[in-house]
Image (spheres, rainbow, N blue to C red):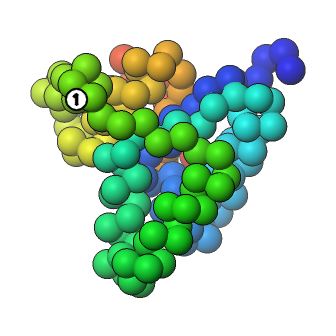
Amino acid sequence: MAGRTTKRVLDAWSVLAILQGEPVGQKALNLIADCLEGGGDVLMTTVNAGEVWYNVARRRSEADADRVIEELRAWGIEFVAADWELARQAAQLKAKGKLSFADAFAAALAKQSKCELVTGDREFRGVESEVKIRWL
């Protein structure tokens, strides 16, 4: 499918928007579906998946958090483990920008994968010169 994005990275913000039923959550779901239906990959670092997990566990329960992670996997989201190269790149972005360390992992994965990061979290404005952002 010409012109379709073949790879996207999600941060916790975009997933939480989906889970909380926010209007931008539907936009995020559409971007995920578009990418996967076009044969692309949707990636998320294990650090950001952990951020989703603790938010759900804190608001609901650990069992619900486990179910959410399994649901994300069932959607076709691929979790990427944080190796040293990704951690180093995240640390470099964190040192340059005003974003949380977990957010820096999402930005680093998008930069490393040469793809766009799907988010609505304004913290990422500080790394727009280095990472392509798909704003929700």
Q: How many numbered marks are there?
A: 1
Q: Horizontal placement of 123 versus 116: left or right?
A: left
Instruction: Name the image quarter holding residue 19.
Output: bottom right
Pick the residue in front: 55 or 77.
77
Residue 102 image position (x, y, % from top left): 27, 45
Pick the residue in front: 81 or 27.
81
Pick the residue in front: 106 or 57.
57
Q: Is residue 136 visible?
A: yes
Q: Residue at x 17, y 28 (%)?
A: 91
| Residue most extreme to the bottom | 60
Q: Residue at x 69, y 42 (%)?
A: 31
Q: Is residue 8 above or below residue 25?
A: above
Residue 52 image position (x, y, % from top left): 40, 60
Instruction: Name the image quarter holding residue 108.
Output: top left
Residue 53 image position (x, y, % from top left): 38, 64
Q: Horizontal placement of 78 versus 46: left or right?
A: right
Q: Helix, strand or loop at disc 1?
A: helix
- Tell me the kind of residue under disc 1: Ala
Reading the image, the residue beneath label 1 is: 87
Q: Is residue 123 visible?
A: no
| Residue most extreme to the left | 95
Q: Residues within 10 Å of mark 1 (few under 14, many from 20)?
A: some
Q: Residue at x 59, y 37 (%)?
A: 42
Q: Which quadrant: the N terminus?
A: top right
Q: Is residue 82 above or below residue 102?
A: above
Q: Residue at x 61, y 70 (%)?
A: 21
Instruction: Name the image quarter holding residue 18.
Output: bottom right
| Residue most extreme to the right | 1
